[in-house]
Image (tube, rainbow, N blue to C red):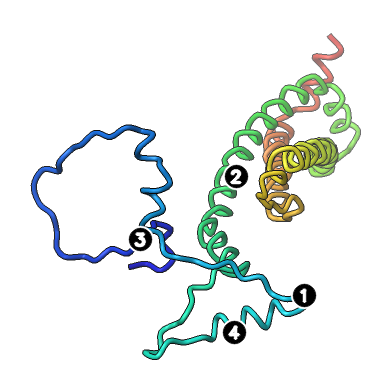
Amino acid sequence: MNPADSTPGRFTLVGILAGESRLGMADFEYANNPFFVLARRRPFQIVYAQPGQKDTSDAYLHAAKQEDGEAAFRVIDASYIRSRIEKTMRNLPLIIGFITFSVAFVVALVIALLNVIAFQVRIDEFGMFLAIGHSRRRLVVKLAVEAAAVALVAWGAGLAVGWLGVWAYDRAWLEPRGILMDILDPRPILFSLSVPVLSTLTGAVALARRLHRMDPVAVIQRRGT
């Protein structure tokens, strides 16, 4: 029996059932009657500590033992609830990271395509830069800085709008129901930072390839004609 199991009642394993299970029907109101649901729940007490004595009270309840050495109480306090929540949400950062990086990859491909389209519009400008002696590396750095500035400004604006939305949702929906949420958790912010970083790197690589293949003489000749 798992002591952290929220299923009410105590169960004893007596064997393994075989064969087809029996089906039955019951009224939904009957099945949800608190008398039948709570009849198998263990008795419990709510303990309120005196002001300033909460730590002492919690320590006493945790240390109390029965004659056989077993714990006298199953204490459900703030630390217990916190550990249960942390255990339940242990894989949440991994899931959020996978979703964020997947979204960042798709966004990076779209940004790379938009950068190539914008580069085509400015192809005469960069052809002139190459013709007068600017290196391709310097032009790639210039484009990467421009893309990074735009991405960071957009990321900051999106972060502000997202935080305001989460704050409003917490105040209007979660907090009145006693659901606590840390809206200043740095982990989602760090995960979201991968979107502008990855999009900038992908766009810079795509533009570097286009600049490497560009012939400035052909661009100037085409412009003259």
- Name the foreground residue: 142 vs 61: 61
Q: Nearer the viewer, residue 180 or 204?
A: 180
Q: Is residue 47 above or below residue 86?
A: below
Q: Which residue is mark 1?
A: 51
Report which residue position mark 3 lands on. Answer: 9
Which residue is tagged 2?
Answer: 101
Amino acid type shown at disc 2? Phe
The residue shown at (68%, 50%) is 188
Q: Earlier in the sequence, mark 1 or mark 3?
A: 3
Between residue 200 and residue 79, name the one nearer to us: 79
Query: What SS does tag 3 mark?
Result: loop
Residue type, numbered disc 3: Gly
Disc 2, SS: helix
Q: Earlier in the sequence, mark 4 or mark 3?
A: 3
Rendered residue at 65%/29% (across/down): 110
- Residue 120 in the image: state x and y as whole percent: 76, 21
| Vertical relation: 129 (above or below) 38 | above
User: In this image, 144 relative to 29: left or right?
Assistant: right
Task: Name the image quarter holding residue 195.
Answer: top right
Residue 84 in percent (x, y) is at: 53, 63
